[in-house]
Image (tube, rainbow, N blue to C red):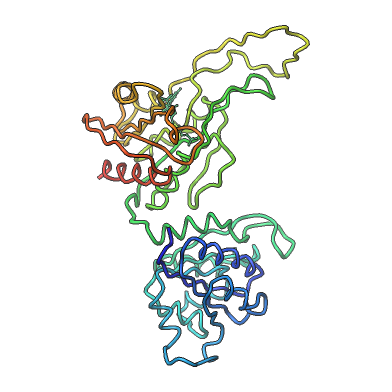
Amino acid sequence: MLENRHIVVGICGGIAAFKAAGLVSQLRQRGADVHCIMTEHAAKLVTPITFGELSGNDVTVDMFANINKWDVEHIALAKLADLFVVAPATADIIGKVANGIADDMLSTTIMATKAKVLFVPSMNTNMYENPIVQENIERLKKFGYEFVEPESGHLACNTTGKGRFPKLETIFDAIEKCLYGKGLLKGKKIIISAGGTQENIDPVRYISNRSSGRMGYAIARAAAMEDADVTLVSCTTALPVPAGVNIIYVHDARELDKAMNSCFDTCDAAVMAAAVSDYRPKVQATQKIKKEAHDSLTIELTQNPDILFGLGQKKKNQFLVGFAAETNDVIEHGKEKLKRKNLDMLVANDVAMPGAGFNVPTNIASLLYKDGTMEQYPKMTKEELGHIIVEKIAEGLR
Ligand code: PMT
């Protein structure tokens, strides 16, 4: 994904400087050509040798040290960069760039680059929430600089709050958005469901299915990369939330129904990738069912609402996408669902095929449209299919 991409990483003097080592190492492992610039304070926290080893390139700290080639280093790196990632970004570098100050190697190179610059702020909560820092961030956003929000949690200064260095996966989502996003869904609101519902039998047992949530999360990630305002209604908790995505966790079909409906009226597009239990136990025991009390057990089931059908009934201008998980006559069943549920597009997957459907990283899908046309795709990663689905939604909304 990052092959042949030149990424300049700016490392500032925050305690999270050591976490930038993991970022640089991963960038290189994913194929990027990585160059590091450290501020003098950063070099007091982690030695430049670490970043030199991990990036495979010289590390620059002092603008005037080692002038052995008459290439103006800050201009050379500014020109070379496809992307600048400043991680951790301190209040100091944010303040400098927001106010046009270029007084060291990092701030000078940022000022001289035409590449996108992604700041990953990480600092003490009070510093982060300081209105001066917040105003500088807003000013930079207005000029087109990108940001990854810090996480909340325990901080090195032994307090708890917002300011933690984000997970690497979150930073990589933002990097890919900066490099590959085309803004196809800018200004559009999209809701996506993912994962398998869990229908309680008693407090410790439930009925569910094999959905991992990967397909829905991949669509959410692709939509966020295209600048959509994304809400992911998730029945699963194991997967990391993609960067910039609002998350609503639900448990069973009725909670999912409520969450989808609460967002539907104001959205531009909705995707039901979740595997919804068609039935739930008619009675949910409030205490654990004891085997000593039953030689055999019959659980009566009652139907859950068909959420997608309900959305199809109330839709106005929304672009509505459903899935069909089938094991036979996939296209025929898909066409029938597309029509009956009043959809604009349906993603039909044959979940009996190896490498498709539940709980695998790949899928094999056909996209069916309400005008009767159809496109069939070979096996690909759910990430790749997510991008195709998002492109089709963007076309549908045009
Ligand atoms: O999560 P993964 O492990 O990545 O797996 C992905 C997937 C196989 C779950 C996904 O690709 C998929 O096929 N999702 C839909 C599963 C499903 O419930 O299909 P269905 O054919 O039973 O339902 C048709 C459509 O109606 C679906 O969009 C479903 O979300 C919706 N539905 C179904 C039942 C119900 N009561 N309410 C609904 O809204």
Between 328 and 244, the residue placed more toward the observer is 328
Left or right relative to 1: residue 42:
right
Left or right relative to 357: residue 286:
right
Where does residue 316 sit, x and y in percent of width and height?
Answer: 30, 32
Residue farthest along the top direction in this orientation: 295
Residue farthest along the front direction in this orientation: 354
Query: Residue at coordinates 53% horizontally, 47% vertically from top-left?
Result: 241
Quarter of the image with the N terminus is bottom left
Quarter of the image with the C terminus is top left
Where does residue 170 sit, x and y in percent of width and height?
Answer: 53, 55
Left or right relative to 357: residue 200:
right
Left or right relative to 392: residue 115:
right
Query: Residue at coordinates 51% horizontally, 79% vertically from top-left?
Result: 106
Q: Quadrant of ligand 1?
A: top left
Query: Residue at coordinates 54% horizontally, 75% vertically from top-left?
Result: 93
Report how many numbered discs are placed on residues in the image.
0
Where does residue 103 sit, x and y in percent of width and height?
Answer: 51, 86
Between 386 and 243, the residue placed more toward the observer is 386
Identify the image quadrant of residue 16.
Answer: bottom right
Identify the image quadrant of residue 309.
Answer: top left
Where does residue 369 sit, x and y in percent of width and height?
Answer: 26, 32
Query: Residue at coordinates 51% horizontally, 32% vertically from top-left?
Result: 211
- Residue 236, above or below 20: above
